[in-house]
Image: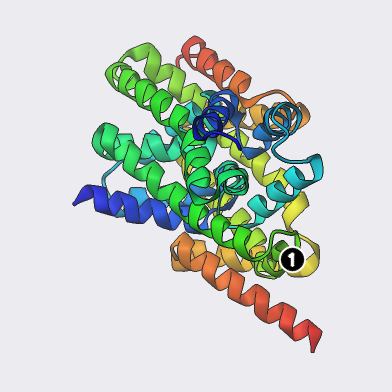
Amino acid sequence: MIYLLLFVEFFKIGLLAIGGGLVTIPFLMELTDKYDWFTRSQLADMIAVSESTPGPIGVNMATYAGFNASGFLGGIVATFGLLLPSLIIIILISQFVMKYQSCMTFQNILFGIRPAVLALILYAGYILAELAVKDIKGGIICAVLFLIIHRFKNVHPIFYILGGAVLGIVLKL
Amino acid sequence: MVGYFELFWTFFKIGLFTFGGGAAMLPLLKREVVERKHWAGDEELLDYYSIGQCTPGIIAINTATFIGYKMRGVFGAILTTFGVVVPSVIIITLVAAVLQNFMDNEYVEEAFAGVRLVVVALILQAVSELWIKGVKGKIGIAFFVLALGLLVFFNLSPVLVILIASAAGLAYLRGIKK
């Protein structure tokens, strides 16, 4: 029953992805090992599309992944699974403590999680790099792109992504 | 009292005009929720936002749920949360359906080959930004290396890595206090 699986997997992601939408990438990467819902290169494309369309990245990626797995309804089920933990947890937090203190208790747990999440994202990035960087030319372009993005952080990713598309066509990557 | 439709519609608009991660949503939230509707004060919004950052889930969804719950209880929370994701569901479904038909096109293939290089560079940039915020001191680096080792050498799932890291973090902090 693919819809149930989608719901459970994305519920887990909603429960464990703490921080920005990019944190969902390692979890989505794991899904490419477990199921044949989408491939790793499709995941790379999903990230690009999710960064350049309206809506929070995490939500966009869930919808996209669900759609790739099982069409329109799959997208809805995955998105619903992703948001349900937030809905439950935030309502509970609102009822008990409304103030920042509740965050302080959580800070302790986050102490170990933050560096671990970073390792997760870096490793996912490495796996995507293996796919995306096909030759030395690709490696050089990727390194130059990183330096440019690092230097001009305030430019919205959508411009880099569009630039990458043009570059791909011009250089016949 | 705020109407249900108004709650949904306000967050639908916020979802529609957010480009990027949860951080991109903050200025929009401020304008709509604080300045126009007066549903929350500046400080209150920042409080919600910081709790949203450190609790499980996508920041954008967490913040929407908070405000919805404050205004109209559980049903309000459901409406704001759905409001913020509905634009994504519609737009992504359309884009995905269209792209599916063009993926075999030579130019689209080349374009995405270029885009994938950008994606890798963007992820590296995100890691370098998070490094400054998230990895503090030698112990932070130790946790990072531990997690990376678990991933590379033991091929553990991200779920397990997160659970182990949170347990190790708590154990470490408890050890310091004693």
Q: Position of residue A30 (x, y in %)?
A: 40, 53
Q: How is the image coloured?
A: rainbow
Point 31% across, 34% down: residue: A67
Along the line of sight, the residue nearer the viewer: A59 or A33:
A59
Point 67% across, 38% down: residue: B125
Furthest residue in direction front, as rendered: B1
- The residue type indicated by label 1 comes to Met
Furthest residue in direction left, as rendered: A1
- B36 sits left or right of A39 in the view: right
Along the line of sight, the residue nearer the viewer: B101 or A145:
B101
Circle 1 is placed at which residue position?
A: A104
Image mark 1: chain:
A
Label 1: state its secondary structure: helix
Q: Position of residue A73 (x, y in %)?
A: 27, 36
Asked whether residue A129 is in view, the answer is: no
Along the line of sight, the residue nearer the viewer: B53 or A168:
B53
- Placement of A29 over or under B25, stated as above or below: below
- B98 sits left or right of B83 in the view: left
Q: Please identify the quarter of the rendering in which residue B43 is found.
A: top right
Q: Please identify the quarter of the rendering in which residue B136 is found.
A: bottom right
Q: Position of residue B42 (x, y in %)?
A: 80, 40
Label 1, residues with CA under 10 Å away: few <14, some 14-19, many ≥20? few
Point 27% across, 53% down: residue: A5
Asked whether residue B22 is in view, the answer is: yes
Furthest residue in direction bottom, as rendered: B178
Point 77% across, 50% down: residue: B132
Q: Position of residue A138 (x, y in %)?
A: 53, 28
- Placement of A51 over or under B65, stated as above or below: above
